[in-house]
Image (cartoon, grey):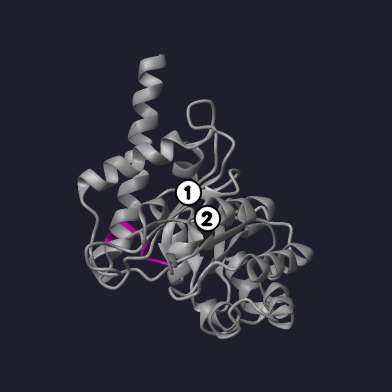
Amino acid sequence: MNGEHKSLSGKIFPRALYVGCAGWSIAKEHASLFPPEGSHLERYAARLPAVEINSSFYRPHRPATYARWSASVPDDFRFAVKVPREITHGRRLVGADDLLDRFLGEVGALGEKLGPLLVQLPPRLPFAADVAGAFFAAVRERFAGAVVCEPRHASWFTPAANRLLEDARVARVAADPAVVPAASEPGGRGGLVYYRLHGSPQMYYSTYSDAYLDDLTDQLCAAPATAPVWCIFDNTARGAATANALDVLRRVRAHVAAHCEKRG
């Protein structure tokens, strides 16, 4: 993976590209595409450059666990980590300072391999400037790294909501399926692009077509050169995410090779 990943950087593709899945399980039908030895995470990290930790949404992990995961992957591998649901769904972004402190104390053990924090909001949580502003201010008081937000209520896709995210240096996820057309496009902070693909037409199950992956590859390659690009497949229920992520990496390499040939 590292050699493949590093080959995507440079003058032709001058940005960090992190393609992966929501979790590092490897379906049996794709096992032959990964090394036979090592833990599931070690095998996964040999082929893909990033992963999104979703288990943190449901339960806390000890700092020692995060440190162990960090030590088991290559230096250029990165982890996105989902913010606990007690913060987003339980307290609905209000009065969560104590939970933020605990969560950040845990994920900090990933060290330099910590990528974005993912704040996925409940579908019925509307945009409220005072609540969102206070929450993201509390995050920024504690954390200077990358933060992405996946709102799932239509009221978040307005100029006012986008400005608030920009001011908080928070990127808005480009999601599929999209609750409104604007939800399919990156928003918020312009210094980070984050695609989160849940599978469609059947969420979590459906694989993406060749035509969709071709278009997605074009979008990844057209992202601003200064923006790190993340592309996470969450269609994990039947293992489609693994094949889609590997396929996108192959397509991006082909794109880079084609541009190199034209320049050569």
Which three-letter amino acid code belongs to the residue tagged 2? Arg
Instruction: Identify the residue at horizontal 52%, vertical 55% (top origin).
Output: 172
The part of the chain drawn in magenta is 32-38
Q: Can residue 74 be seen in this snapshot?
A: no
Q: Is residue 37 above or below residue 250?
A: below
Q: Earlier in the sequence, mark 2 or mark 1?
A: 2
Determine the image quadrant of residue 254: top left
| In contact (CB < 8 Å): disc 2 and disc 1 | yes
Q: Is residue 164 found left or right of 58 in the rendered image?
A: right
The mark tally for this picture is 2
Taking depth in this image into account, of 167 and 170 the one nearest to the observer is 167
**For the residue labelled by badge 1, is the local secondary structure a helix, a strand or a loop?**
loop
Q: Is residue 242 found left or right of 57 in the rendered image?
A: left
* Image spot of residue 166 (x, y percent): 63, 50
Taking depth in this image into account, of 235 and 75 the one nearest to the observer is 235
Q: Is residue 88 found left or right of 101 in the rendered image?
A: left
Instruction: Identify the residue at horizontal 68%, vertical 70% (top origin).
Output: 135
**For the residue labelled by badge 2, is the local secondary structure a helix, a strand or a loop?**
strand
Which three-letter amino acid code belongs to the residue tagged 1? Pro
* Image spot of residue 157 (x, y percent): 48, 56
Residue at label 1?
186
Taking depth in this image into account, of 168 and 20 the one nearest to the observer is 168
Task: Identify the residue at the far top of this view.
Answer: 264
Residue at label 2?
172
Predominant secondary structure in magenta? loop
Quarter that holds the C terminus: top left
Q: Residues within 10 Å of mark 2 (few under 14, many from 20)?
A: many
